[in-house]
Image (cartoon, rainbow, N blue to C red):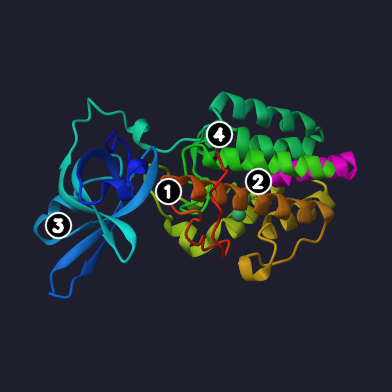
Amino acid sequence: MGIKQLKDIDRNYISQNFELAVLIGDVKVKVARNGKRFADIIIQDASKMMEAKYWDYEDNEEFINSISAEEPVNIKAVVGEYQGQIQVTIKHIEKADMDSIDIVDLIPTSTWGLENMKEGLDFFYEKVTSPHMKKLIDKMIFSNDHFKMFSTHPAARRVHHNYYHGLLQHTLEVLKFSYIVAATKKLSERQIERLIVMAMLHDWAKIIEYKPLPNVGFTEEGIMLGHVFLGAHNTLNAINEIEDFDHDDKLIIINGILSHHGYLEFGSPVLPKTVEAQILHQADKMSGDIESIMTFISEQENEEEAFTSKLWNMGTNYYKKGTD
Ligand SMILES: [Fe+2]
Ligand SMILES: [Fe+2]
């Protein structure tokens, strides 16, 4: 078998060496007890993102800092264990031959397929028939400037949908979940239109908040302002450029974007004030939670225990037997 991708690494390989092509993300420099500086380096390939120790950082500082997020590297590393957790230690890093590696092969990608997702998005686009709301989503999502970013961006850094096309897949999930609830509860056509617009735009500002892959992490705007505010701000600006945009629709859509995290303590400055906004919040939570649980379980499927370790955002561990 051997280690062909990062996700193959498990307890069976403890103390074994391996070589892989990966991308390098954040490099956190730390000081060891002997005063020497080392680094915790985020490495990733299409299968997984993980942290690795690099003890020789101090001697190779300049080289490590010269590697950009778009440059594949070859690493030689060893699998170890520290306090019960798998730990990967990098022994050697060198830049990879760019001709032999396609960078897209090292970026995790949504398995839904871009064409399928575009079709899915079209289904909901067709349901928005009021000219002012159609203009709004045309401007913000379907314009040439935005669609490329919107359709390739990840939806999160760590917890859920952190892959190529992740924002598009998450948005589509939220649209589908919202639509089923709206149809079941027989919301009016106007309410359904607003819900679709809100769902399409709720995380739109993640194209500003996160760096584009293969970079990982937040932009300065993201850290300082966050996607909840940025989404509402940009949507309001776009609405103000559209003549005769209905006043109620404006308030309801902006409230939906601002309140989609559901609670003040989760970063929403106001609470959901309409049925549409509450549906959006719950659909958003469902999409994120289920994705994070499924990814978490699949990342630990190679290990023998019946239960996973604790998933911090859900506050519990999960039973793995019978998940295949
Ligand atoms: Fe969000
Ligand atoms: Fe979301």
Identify which amino acid the numbered label 3 is placed on: Glu
Residue 80 % position (x, y): 24, 55
Identify which amino acid the numbered label 1 is placed on: Lys
Q: Toward the viewer: 268 or 233?
A: 268
| Badge 1 element | loop
Distance (Cα) linking label 2 and label 3 = 42 Å
Distance (Cα) linking label 3 and label 1 = 24 Å
- Dominant secondary-structure state across the stretch colored magenta: helix
| Badge 3 element | helix
What residue do we see at 68% from left, 57% from top? Answer: 260
Mark 1 Cα-neighbour bin, 10 Å: few <14, some 14–19, many ≥20? some
Quick check: 246 left or right of 151?
right
Please check the rendered image and state whether residue 197 is part of the magenta-colored stretch, yes or no.
yes
Distance (Cα) linking label 4 and label 2 = 12 Å
Quick check: 323 left or right of 189?
left
- Quarter of the image with the C terminus is top right
Distance (Cα) linking label 4 and label 1 = 16 Å
Residue 71 appears in the picture as rendered: no
Q: Nearer the viewer, mark 4 or mark 3?
A: 3
* Sooner in the amino-acid sequence: mark 2 or mark 3: 3
Q: Give the numbered dot on residue 70.
A: none
Quarter assignment of residue 131? top right
Q: Nearer the viewer, mark 3 or mark 1?
A: 3
Residue indicated by mark 2: 201
In this figure, what is the number of numbered marks? 4
Residue 67 appears in the picture as rendered: yes
Residue indicated by mark 3: 61
